[in-house]
Image (spheres, rainbow, N blue to C red):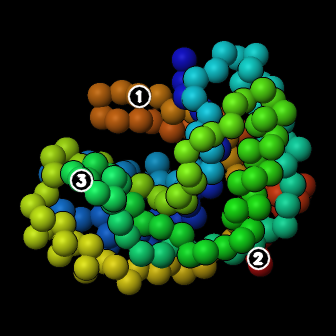
């Protein structure tokens, strides 16, 4: 059974902007370009009936398109041995509003609230083993001022995630426009 999550897919120009960040850190598994996304809500494993309820509930989430920029770099956990390298998001109130609307829709579909604090980010790499402190510090310093070009957010997607020997493979299950009829190519 796949795991489901709601996310923003990264446009091609943003994937290109992220490419220089995705090298130079030793023994890591870099996220493949086609898997780069910004998770809005992890849902988990659901049977087909509940997955259909989630898909239907998400179709009712509407909003105003907005621009977003990725900013900075960091790692999870913030203390202790890092396991994930990520780039963050420049503060954008509309992103928080979209997340809340998605959470409400999922709640109406019977999905329990997520108790973890939301930290919007795009995962760049998973560390197979921790780099040296000096190597990590150099990498983080070198990329600390990263700022992507702005990109339009006019919708979001429901993804399924299947684990294999190389990590997770994500597939788009459904796409949703914030304003019906306005797709990802909208000029903002």
Residue 51: which quarter of the image?
Answer: top right
Q: Which of 126 and 137 lies nearest the eye of the viewer? A: 137
Few, some or many residues within 10 Å of mark 1 (<14, 14–19, 20+): few
Please say if the residues under marks 1 and 2 sit with CB atoms less than 8 Å apart.
no
Residue denoted by label 3: 80
- Disc 1 secondary structure class: strand
Q: Which of 174 and 39 lies nearest the eye of the viewer? A: 39
Residue denoted by label 1: 163
Few, some or many residues within 10 Å of mark 2 (<14, 14–19, 20+): few
Q: Identify the residue at the far bottom of this view.
A: 145
Residue denoted by label 2: 187
Quadrant containing the N terminus in the rendered view: top right
* Residue at x 26% of width, y 73% of height: 140
164 lies above or below 8: above
Q: CA distance from mark 1 to mark 2?
A: 35 Å
Q: CA distance from mark 2 to mark 3?
A: 42 Å
177 on left or right of 162: right
156 on left or right of 116: right
* Residue at x 29% of width, y 28% of height: 165
Residue 112: which quarter of the image?
Answer: top right
- Disc 2 secondary structure class: loop
Q: Earlier in the sequence, mark 1 or mark 2?
A: 1
Q: Which of 152 and 113 lies nearest the eye of the viewer? A: 113
Residue 128: which quarter of the image?
Answer: top left
- The location of residue 129, given as percent across then percent down, is 15, 46
- Disc 3 secondary structure class: loop
Q: Nearer the viewer, mark 2 or mark 3?
A: 3
Q: CA distance from mark 1 to mark 3?
A: 26 Å
Few, some or many residues within 10 Å of mark 3 (<14, 14–19, 20+): few
- The location of residue 146, given as percent across then percent down, is 40, 80
Q: Is residue 129 visible?
A: yes
Q: Earlier in the sequence, mark 1 or mark 3?
A: 3
């Amino acid at each position: 059974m796949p795991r489901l999550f709601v996310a923003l897919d990264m446009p091609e120009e943003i994937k290109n902007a992220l490419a220089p960040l995705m090298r130079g850190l030793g023994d890591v598994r870099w996220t493949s370009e086609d898997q780069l996304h910004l998770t809005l809500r992890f849902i988990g494993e659901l049977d087909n009936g509940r997955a259909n309820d989630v898909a239907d509930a998400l179709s009712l989430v509407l909003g105003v398109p907005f621009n977003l920029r990725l900013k900075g770099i960091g790692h999870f956990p913030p203390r202790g041995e890092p396991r994930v390298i990520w780039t963050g998001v420049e503060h954008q109130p509309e992103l928080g509003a979209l997340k809340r609307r998605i959470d409400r829709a999922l709640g109406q579909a019977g999905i329990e609230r997520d108790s973890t604090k939301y930290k919007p980010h795009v995962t760049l790499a998973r560390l197979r083993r921790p780099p040296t402190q000096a190597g990590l510090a150099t990498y983080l310093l070198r990329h600390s001022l990263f700022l992507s070009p702005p990109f339009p957010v006019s919708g979001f997607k429901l993804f399924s995630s299947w684990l294999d020997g190389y990590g997770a493979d994500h597939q788009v299950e459904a796409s949703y426009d914030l304003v019906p009829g306005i797709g990802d190519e909208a000029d903002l």
